[in-house]
Image (cartoon, helix red, strand yellow):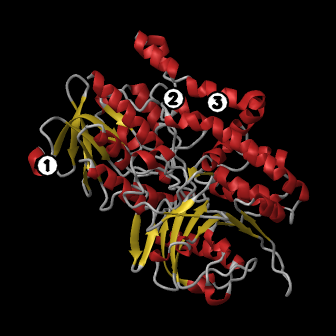
């Protein structure tokens, strides 16, 4: 075993602070979190010498761009941006470091499977930022729903406004109230401010909002609307990435999590990143390295090193190199961080048991597709010369005309079977960013569910099972857009097992763990350890498994970095 020589890496002689991605943390997409570049950028800007270790050949965790098919650049895992905290744009000067966004408007397209006529195509639901146009679209299915939609949007906007401050601070430390010093108790008391502010914002409507957070989204949407195409379209955000049905209690929070983003001052906006999601990771990395951080790829962390006093003293890499450090931040999942990389003798048995019992079920199979022409939907036929139309730039929801379809797809997976009619979110980022594909061609992202991690009767996700499922997905798309299958040049299929193997997502879960109420806020990843610290002093969790959870958000990393900076001052 040899120790890394600081001079050869142009590090200062003072102790270094190692941020690592032990098995490549996320998450989604992805909706889901990035690697530790943002944490490194924050720490390095405050004068903390920082090094980042990335297991894969490319930085970014799940927010990566990979040319897995020659000439076609894919956001292989996470594929959309909305949730990244606005402060991170500003603090890390991401535009200066090359980040360019393609905002999508309209943002949602749900075509129907209906018998059209020579003069009339099947109906579809197209939603964007123009409320009058949204109401016109919704009125095809229900005039009552068209009238209710602005009130629903305002209702949800207010809830987002209340929850937003909770994302940018560690949860209230209950233990500090009980056993902490006076200073610790005062700090814990200050953490109550976002909660109190949220209560004031919601006011007398708090009981209705409580139902959104705790109830099934089907019940919430039934209160507001009557038309299934609208309810099912909205419900997709409540189940995406989650092994839940629209009828599952708590699914309302998952929807909230997906509408709380903001881009360019536009609440709820989603965008494609110019050059794919890897360009976001590159911009953050550039911000970090500009201030002196060091980033290494193809460097796998094998073990967190702990001294005889129970304090972290660095990491050992798989190649035998040692890196000494006062502080280690892990963007890997809680399971990898604490069950595989941390010496078990330093972790309380109750803590280990809770980590091992985390719900990491995943319904997701991501399929990346290279095509030689745009999909031609019966509900919205292509324009001459095959030019992208507004609906091609949206998230296109297929098999989403009825919440019953979503529930049935979920029931299939609960029995260990891939869904017979899977929920499909189809995106075509090359419709706004032509740099991703050769002229006339496109990259298509298919975010599909439900596919169980473990198949019935002990079957494995071998190539035959993967291709059988992908063929089923393509048959579904063909029903909406005849000719799609003949346009396919190549495809990349990532089942839950592949997402775990390649990106380190436990069970394939894009959030590092279910976004259910029992695994949020005070309890993320486990109760009494939601402040990014863990039982080993100097070891911090900074990925999607920490508060506030998954998504290409950066909040957990930013919050963890601030916690580390406070702790370093007291060391």
Give the residue at x 74% y 28%: 203
| Disc assigned to residue 10 | 1
Helix, strand or loop under label 3: helix
Crowding near the residue tagged with mark 1, few <14, some 14–19, many ≥20 C-alpha atoms within 10 Å: few
Depth check: give the residue in front, 328 or 15: 15
Which residue shows up at 56% across the image and 35% down it?
165
Residue 318's spot in the image, x, y percent?
Answer: 21, 50
- Residue situated in front as seen by the camera: 241 or 360: 241
- CA distance for labels 2 and 1: 37 Å
Q: Residues within 10 Å of mark 3 (few under 14, many from 20)?
A: many
Q: Please give the residue where the numbered disc 3 appears in the rendered image.
A: 198
In the depicted structure, whether residue 179 falls above or below residue 275? above
Q: Which mark is residue 171?
A: 2
Answer with mark 2 or mark 3, whichever residue precedes in sequence.
2
The answer to which of marks 2 and 1 sits earlier in the sequence is 1
Q: CA gap, disc 3 to disc 1?
A: 46 Å
User: Does dot 2 land on a helix, a strand or a loop?
Assistant: loop
């Amino acid at each position: 075993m040899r120790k890394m020589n600081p001079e050869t890496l142009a590090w200062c002689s003072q102790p270094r602070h190692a941020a690592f991605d032990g098995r490549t943390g996320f998450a989604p997409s992805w909706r889901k979190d990035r690697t530790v570049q943002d944490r490194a950028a924050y720490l390095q800007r405050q004068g903390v010498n920082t090094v980042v270790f990335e297991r894969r050949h490319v930085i970014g965790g799940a927010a990566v761009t990979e040319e897995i098919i020659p000439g076609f650049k894919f956001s292989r895992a996470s594929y959309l941006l909305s949730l990244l905290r606005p402060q991170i744009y500003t603090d890390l000067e991401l535009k200066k470091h090359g980040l360019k966004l393609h905002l999508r408007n309209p943002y949602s397209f749900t075509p129907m499977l209906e018998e059209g006529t020579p003069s009339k195509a099947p109906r579809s639901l197209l939603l964007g930022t123009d409320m009058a146009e949204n109401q016109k679209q919704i009125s095809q299915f229900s005039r009552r729903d068209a009238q209710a939609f602005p009130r629903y949007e305002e209702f949800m906007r207010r809830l987002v406004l209340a929850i937003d401050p909770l994302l940018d601070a560690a949860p209230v430390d209950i233990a500090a109230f009980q056993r902490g010093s006076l200073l610790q108790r005062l700090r814990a008391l200050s953490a109550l401010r976002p909660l109190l502010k949220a209560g004031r914002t919601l006011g007398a409507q708090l009981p209705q909002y409580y139902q959104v957070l705790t109830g099934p989204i089907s019940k919430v949407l039934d209160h507001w609307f009557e038309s299934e195409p609208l309810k099912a379209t909205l419900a997709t955000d409540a189940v995406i990435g989650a092994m839940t049905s629209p009828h599952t209690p708590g699914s309302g929070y998952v929807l909230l999590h997906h509408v709380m983003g903001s881009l360019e001052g536009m609440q709820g906006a989603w965008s494609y990143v110019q050059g794919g999601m890897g360009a976001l990771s590159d911009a953050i990395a550039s911000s970090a390295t500009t201030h002196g951080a060091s980033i290494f790829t193809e460097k796998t962390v094998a073990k967190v090193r702990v001294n005889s006093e129970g304090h972290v003293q660095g990491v050992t890499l798989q190649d035998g190199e040692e890196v000494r450090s006062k502080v280690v931040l892990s963007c890997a999942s809680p399971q990898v961080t604490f069950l595989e990389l941390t010496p078990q003798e330093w972790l309380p048995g109750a803590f280990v048991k809770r980590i091992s019992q985390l719900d990491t079920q995943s319904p997701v199979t991501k399929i990346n597709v290279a095509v030689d022409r745009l999909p031609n939907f019966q509900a919205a036929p292509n324009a001459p010369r095959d030019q992208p139309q507004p609906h091609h730039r949206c998230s296109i929801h297929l098999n989403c005309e009825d919440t019953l379809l979503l529930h049935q797809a979920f029931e299939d997976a609960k029995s260990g079977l891939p869904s017979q009619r899977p929920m499909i979110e189809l995106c075509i980022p090359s419709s706004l960013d032509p740099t991703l594909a050769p002229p006339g061609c496109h990259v298509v992202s298919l975010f599909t569910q439900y596919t169980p991690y473990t198949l019935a009767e002990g079957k494995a996700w071998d190539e035959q099972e993967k291709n059988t499922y992908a063929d089923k997905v393509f048959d579904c798309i063909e029903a909406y857009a005849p000719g799609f299958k003949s346009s396919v040049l190549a495809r990349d299929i990532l089942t839950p097992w592949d997402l775990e193997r390649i990106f380190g997502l436990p069970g394939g879960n894009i959030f590092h763990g279910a976004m259910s109420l029992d695994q949020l806020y005070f309890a993320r990843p486990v109760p009494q350890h939601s402040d990014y610290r863990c039982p080993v002093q100097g070891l911090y969790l900074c990925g999607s498994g920490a508060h506030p959870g998954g998504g290409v958000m950066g909040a957990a990393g930013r919050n963890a970095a601030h916690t580390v900076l406070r702790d370093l001052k007291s060391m």
